[in-house]
Amino acid sequence: MTLKNSDNPPTCFPESLFEGDPDEATPWWVARTRSRQEKALAWELCRRGMAYYLPLVSRPQKCRQRMRAAIVPLFNGYLFFRGDLAARHEAVKTGRIAQVLPVADQQNLQQELAALARVTSSRLHLELCDFMAEGQRVEIIAGPFEGLTGIVVKRRNRQRLVLQIETIRQAAAVEIGLDQTRPV
């Protein structure tokens, strides 16, 4: 748990990872990290010049009887990185990875991570939710998330757009207005 922004690794390295056309030749990998090693692995990959994405969010934490905002990984134990087999081997050599999961649908993961990066960069409240197998898929047609697709769920009388990461079977949700959506 790191409290200062400056002590955290960049969420996305390089910053232009999701800008422009994706590099189809360099595959994505999912690193299942050892316990509480997500940020340390991100720093190691950054030092080695390897592309990665680690979604970070601010969460309230109790520390010495006071509440503070801690910056923590959205998905505990996961970091997404790009590289060939040699880069994969370099990442494993850090000793911070328990398992590397191959990604069957590279294009789908690229789209899911790009959507998640867009939402996390907006600094809106994002929370974990159950991964959903079924539901109404919608496309956002207005507002800052125009063009994103996801599943709409209703919780506590509020509508949320669920962004799923199929590869790790995890999901996150952000509040939206239904007037900004249309069924897909």
Image: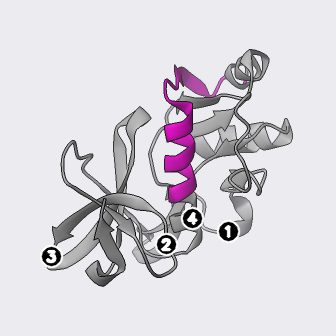
For residue 145, which numbered disc appears in the image? 2
Dot 4, how many residues are within 10 Å of its Cα: few (below 14), some (14-19), or many (20+)? some
Question: Which residue is found at the position 46% from the left and 54% from the top?
Answer: 74
Dot 1 amino acid type: Asn
Q: Nearer the viewer, mark 3 or mark 4?
A: 4
Asked which secondary structure carries label 1, the reply is helix
For residue 156, which numbered disc appears in the image? 3
For residue 118, which numbered disc appears in the image? 4
Q: Is residue 146 left or right of residue 11?
A: left
Q: Circles 1 and 4: CB distance less than 8 Å?
A: no
- Earlier in the chain: of badge 3 and badge 4, it is 4
Using the image as rendered, state which of residue 24 and residue 1 is in the foreground.
24
Q: Please report the bounds of the magenta region as a residue range.
A: 94-116
Using the image as rendered, state which of residue 42 and residue 15 is in the foreground.
15
Q: Nearer the viewer, mark 1 or mark 2?
A: 2
Asked which secondary structure carries label 3, the reply is loop
Q: Circles 4 and 2: CB distance less than 8 Å?
A: yes
- Does 95 appear in magenta? yes
